[in-house]
Image (cartoon, rainbow, N blue to C red):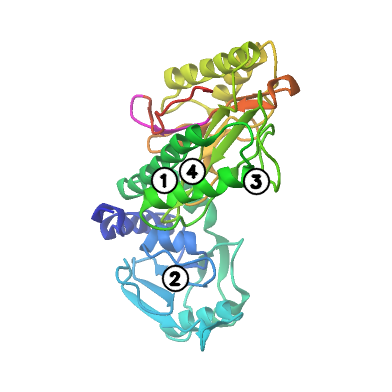
Amino acid sequence: MSAELGVDLEACRRRQSRLVEWMNQERVDRVLLTTNQHIQYLFGPRFAWTFAAAAAIDAQGKSVVIAPHAEPAVCAADRVDVYKPKMLSTMRNDQALLAANALAQSLGGRIDASRLAVEFSAYWQYLAPFHSAELIDVEPILFRHRRRKSADELAKLRVAIRGTEIMYEVARGIIRPGISELEVYNTLQSAANVAFGEPMTATGNDYQVNSRGGAPRANVVAQPGQLYILDLGPAFRGYFADNARTIAVSKVSSEQQAAFEKIREVFQMIESDVKPGVRCREIFDRAQAILDQAEVGVFNHHLGHGIGLFPHEGPHLNPNWDDVFEVGDVFTAEPGLYAESLQAGIRIENDYLVTDNGVENLSPFPMELK
């Protein structure tokens, strides 16, 4: 893999600067982080989910990261301290306590702050004895900032999406009557790892035939006439792809083809209508109206969502949210139609980048059923 897929220190520092700007606007003295995703986003190193890590940044931009094992080769922090998460190769179950103590010691034994921003969903009470600050939630602004993908993030997302393209190329060559869901799953996982040149950092999503989705089932094999919805979400260095293709096990019926053509209309609308400033809810409603005209099948789930360091991020193409498209958003669009007579339905999903003038299709590979 090329050097651009490593840690981009300057990009990390730009993201830190955005956070510091918010801190000064909100009179926040310090931010404490205890989720590995946000530590990767702001400082670069990606720590495995099995290990706790922590970080802090103050309103002047001075930062410290607490790393498990050893100091990372590259890290956009002023200081990196280390704690030991294992004893004689056994992973400790009190890693959060150890990392909290190490963070407090790195800050001088006391966390000086009147207003302290933490991740409410993941704040460690182990840190409470070291401060008496008012706590506010930093997660909403971090998720807000994460919507605008920078060049280093886009590079990783493009690799992840390229992995799905290769997986679909392989799938079209192996899906046939009699193949098992587990064989499809195992073959496609291997193809993604080979494409990445390293193990995936996560995987998903749907590998069931004649089904709307789910994990591969033991002893279930494809039958003639069925459709195989593959909704794949391999992650490369923490960044998730998410796109779907539906592949016919044998011949495509006229009813299945008609449903596919109606779904294709949704993509034509998205690529024409999505621009910065457009409301996601409006795009959802237009897609629903198109799919409601289908002679067979129902559409009854979200139209899409953002992707990045988590499989589902903003913006939300979902009537339960009221997000607005912005430059730098990377989102999925996944219209579908489902009916028993379609065996069991069709879902196609593309990944898009919102640009100044519209969208770029990041997954421009074949969508056809066969």
In which quadrant of the rendered view does residue 169 lie?
A: top left
- Asked which secondary structure carries label 4, the reply is loop
- Asked which secondary structure carries label 1, the reply is helix
Asked if the magenta segment contains residue 350, the reply would be yes
Q: The residue under label 1 is which amino acid type?
A: Ala
Of residue 336 and residue 63, the one placed in the foreground of this image is 336
Tag 4–tag 2 contact (CB < 8 Å): no
Instruction: Provide residue 3's location: percent of width, then percent of height.
Output: 24, 56
The residue under label 1 is: 160
Instruction: Compute the Cα span from label 4 to label 3.
Output: 23 Å
Instruction: Compute the Cα span from label 4 to label 1.
Output: 11 Å
Q: Which residues are magenta?
A: 349-357
Q: The residue under label 4 is which amino acid type?
A: Ile
- Asked which secondary structure carries label 2, the reply is strand
Instruction: Compute the Cα span from label 4 to label 2.
Output: 24 Å
Instruction: Compute the Cα span from label 1 to label 2.
Output: 27 Å
- Judged left or right of residue 332, residue 156 is left
